[in-house]
Image (tube, rainbow, N blue to C red):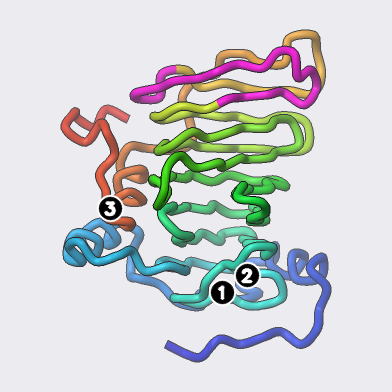
Amino acid sequence: MNAQKTIPQPSRRTLLRGLTAIGTLGTLGTLGTLSALPGLARAAGNLPATPGFRFIKGPVGVDDTRASIGLNIKPGQTAMTGEGGEAVYIIGPDAFLQHEKTKITYEDENGIQTMRFASGKALAVFGKGRSGPRNVQILTPAAVIAIHNTAGCYIDADETRTYFCLCYGEAELTPKGDPKQKETLSAKHHDRPLIITLAGEKKIAPAPFSGHTDSELTTLENAVGRWPPFHKQSDSR
């Protein structure tokens, strides 16, 4: 694996424009295929999950740096994927699958861990804290989502709407267009996918299941040494 390379002093906007062009950064490192991750996780036994990037395909960057296998994402940094880009990475007890043309900033302040979701699509699994319940929130242009304890979820967001599937676990969902329409969610297996919008009187509406699979959730959970709660069920998604 080549050493990490830093792009000489471009702005984040310049880097993101470059990422959107196919092949700008190229394939900087992979674990072969995404399907290889579960086997690697099982082979690790009870060892702590290795933080940082575990899989990279296509144009992927962190702030002004090209992503490479093992590179850690630190609080205040932004993970970006361009067209055709995809990445799996681990932050603490959590694992993420970030799809193409997605920009997420990770923050950690006063014990609250935050995913600031500018746009795009990502699947996430959240593990237990070392000492008691965790405070994790996901911010999109249309919603504030608070994750409680362990959970898995999928987000597809743009400037006006957010698709959110709580795959399993518990969460609180607050639409930014009308915080009074806040809802408490609980799911065992993709029970109630939702669309949250800024426009219209009703800010939260049911939506069809889309964009992610149980196999991907299993891959992420395996990457941090866990299994999803539905793993004994047949994979129907």
Give the magenta-colored segment's residue range: 172-191
Q: Secondary structure at mark 3?
A: helix
* Among the two numbered marks 3 and 1 on one chain, the one whose residue lies closer to the N terminus: 1
Q: Give the residue type at disc 3.
A: Asn
The residue pinned by badge 3 equals 222
Q: Give the residue type at disc 2.
A: Gly
Q: Nearer the viewer, residue 226 or 157?
A: 226
Q: Secondary structure at mark 1?
A: loop
Q: What residue sits 43% from the left and 37% below the top?
A: 149
Q: What residue sits 66% from the left and 17% below the top?
A: 182
Q: What residue sits 32% from the left and 30% below the top?
A: 237
Determine crowd level at label 3: few under 14, some 14-19, many 20+ residues with C-alpha closer than 10 A.
many
Instruction: Kindly check if marks 1 and 2 are in contact, taking CB atoms under 8 A apart as contact.
Output: yes
Q: Secondary structure at mark 2?
A: strand
Does 237 sit left or right of 28 as displayed?
left
Q: Is residue 26 above or below residue 134?
A: below
Marks 3 and 1 sit apart, C-alpha to C-alpha, by 22 Å
* Among the two numbered marks 3 and 2 on one chain, the one whose residue lies closer to the N terminus: 2
- Where residue 42 appears, as percent x and y from the top left, is 19, 59
Q: Is residue 167 above or below residue 40?
A: above
The residue pinned by badge 2 equals 61
